[in-house]
Image (cartoon, helix red, strand yellow):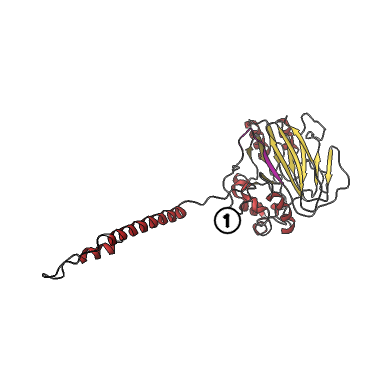
Amino acid sequence: MNASENRNSMASQQPSGTNAAPVLTPRGPRRATWLRLALVLGVVATFLGVGACGRSDRPSKLPTNPTGAFPIPGGDPPSDPGVPGVPAPGHEVVFVGAGDIANSVSGAEATAKVLDRTPGTVFTLGDNAYSDGTLAEYQQKYQPTWGRHRARTRPSPGNHEYNTSGASGYYTYFGQVAGPSKRGYYSFDLGDWHIISLNSNVSMSAGSAQEQWLRADLAANRTRCTLAYWHHPRFSSGEHGSSTASKALWQALQEAGAEVILVGHDHDYERFAPQLADGTLDRSKGIRQFVVGTGGTSLRSVSSPIKNSEVINDDSHGVLKLTLGPGTYSWEFLPVSGDDFRDSGTGTCH
């Protein structure tokens, strides 16, 4: 019974005149029925009210999704440079990605579908959105494809990003996860591994700000295994070929006992044997480099391999999946639907 009904019942018990007999409210079975009905309605109203408050006052929880492929439709880029949902040290983690990605939506979509079914942290090796890395190109080509995985992506920039002044499209799109102060290099831990994203579009020479930062970062690292990635290859059999520009960074990583380097730029896939910064084969102290420029843009043919090259493919798009464990790593090239090239293997940390 609501407040209005209570007031009306009370008023009906008052005499309307000095000789008027009181009009009594229903009693007995009828009154009991009304009370029971009011009790039921009150319980239902309370339940609905609490439910509505719960839905409006509590933030919604993302559904469980093993791929982590939650879209971010035009919203703000992630601001936390950490990697959410990563297993604690002592467990294997997956690091998966490629470079040279969104020249067209169709090419990037094919590799994005491979990411859709592959859990783990995603990396990019630069030239993520063609041809100038503008914010509009990121929104139109990258966001509908690899952008599905932006929340779990740790990127690096390429030369096409810097076709736009200061790579502003790249830094605006990815936000703080692209590195502090728009310098383009940063590091994080992933399971038992230390991961370093570097920027091959700014100075990498000995004594440069980036090289000094890298050496300090490596000195502070307490993990056994280290992986670094950037855009331009130190060694490559592809069209652009090898470059000595990153030699000082390789040297610093080599001295710290790093295991793996990932690069893009050349539009092919290539795996090298472990080697030193000067190109000397060294399976005990050398670093294994992968060129993975197979993220979606057109591929380019490779004429002949340079020394220490172990595997080359120039006709399959796909991503490289690395499974990083305590003291170990394995790799697997995952081709897009319709392509059939495969490469896989294992390694141990220094």
Q: Quadrant of the N terminus?
A: bottom left
Query: Tag count in the figure?
Result: 1
In the image, is residue 91 part of the stretch drawn in magenta?
A: yes
Amino acid on which disc 1 is placed = Gly
Q: Which x, y percent locates residue 142?
A: 68, 55
Name which residue lies at 77% across and 53% down: 337
Q: Residue furthest front?
A: 29
Q: Which residues are magenta?
A: 87-97
Q: Which x, y percent locates residue 67?
A: 65, 48
For residue 225, side relative to residue 342 (left or right): left
Q: Which x, y percent locates residue 35?
A: 30, 58
In the image, is residue 167 part of the stretch drawn in magenta?
A: no
Name which residue lies at 61% across and 46% down: 177
Given residues 326 and 103, the one toward you in this image is 326
| Residue holding disc 1 | 75
Q: Secondary structure at mark 1?
A: loop
Given residues 219 and 105, the one toward you in this image is 105
Can residue 237 be seen here? The reply is no
Report which quarter residue 221 is drawn in. top right
Report which quarter residue 27 is drawn in. bottom left
Q: Which x, y percent locates residue 164?
A: 68, 55
Q: Residue furthest right?
A: 304
- Residue 58 drawn above or below residue 347: below
Can residue 21 be seen here? The reply is yes
Q: Quadrant of the C terminus?
A: top right
Name which residue lies at 79% across and 48% down: 266
